[in-house]
Amino acid sequence: MGRTRKLTIIITIVAILFLGAYGRHKYINREPSNIVGRLQRRDMDEISGIAASGINKDLYYIHNDSGDTSRFFAILPSGEVKSIIYFKGDPKERLGVHDCEDIAVGPGPDSGKSYVYMGDIGDNYSVRKYITVYRMEEKTAWAKSGTARANDAAPIHFKYPDGPKDAETLMIDPIEKLIYIVSKRQDSVTVYTSPANL
């Protein structure tokens, strides 16, 4: 086989491999087809948590990270905002909350009712004397358009037994009726629990 023929075969193989790699790259990086919606408000600029409603079908609660006021949003899967729910935060905090990191939905003190738990549990420098979880009864009206107020937001203050921690995750166990908070930033995380129906 001549040198020219060998060179033609090698160039053809390289071109086929290049086109195959390019096609695979385009396929992997294409926009996912399972996106059902997009957030549509500019003030939802640092979403930190999401929880599905316990009483309203296809309604989700989301909130911003630190720098926002004591509020959260009720949205549809499309990203459309149905309502903005404001609650009374800590008057010692300039915005009512310090650093909300997560939100959860689950049982509470009254059986048969669903509650939203807002976790003001962020502490980047591990200096807070206590963290706060706000619990409020979930309302069917939050699925309607407009602004709402959760007047029954009850602050539950927690102090870690082993000193201040930064945390990112808040969960509610509906079977054991426990609040779970998971720390971060250390070599290993710690899971803290407390009864949900305080």
Image (cartoon, rainbow, N blue to C red):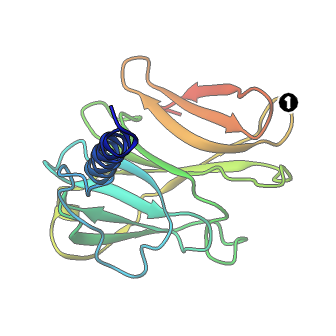
Looking at the picture, does residue 177 appear above or below residue 17? above
- Residue type pointed to by label 1: Asp
Q: Where does the N terminus fall, quadrant-wise?
A: top left
Q: Nearer the viewer, residue 183 or 196?
A: 183
Looking at the picture, does residue 4 appear above or below residue 87? above
Q: Mark 1 packing: few (<14 Cα in 10 Å), some, or many (20+)?
A: few
x then y, percent, for residue 172: 44, 32
Residue situated furthest front in the rendering: 2
Q: Nearer the viewer, residue 81 or 158?
A: 81
Quadrant of the rendered image containing residue 89: bottom right
Residue situated furthest bottom in the rendering: 42
Q: Is residue 12 left or right of residue 44?
A: left
x then y, percent, for residue 40: 28, 76
Identify which residue is drawn at 83% across, 50% down: 129
Q: Is residue 17 left or right of residue 172?
A: left
Identify which residue is drawn at 78% across, 42% down: 165
Looking at the picture, does residue 140 appear above or below residue 169? below
Looking at the picture, does residue 34 appear above or below residue 71? above
For label 1, the SS is loop
x then y, percent, for residue 64: 49, 66
Q: Is residue 161 left or right of residue 62?
A: right
Q: Which residue is mark 1?
A: 162
Please state the total of marks drawn on the protein image: 1
Identify which residue is drawn at 75% across, 26% down: 188
x then y, percent, for residue 61: 33, 56
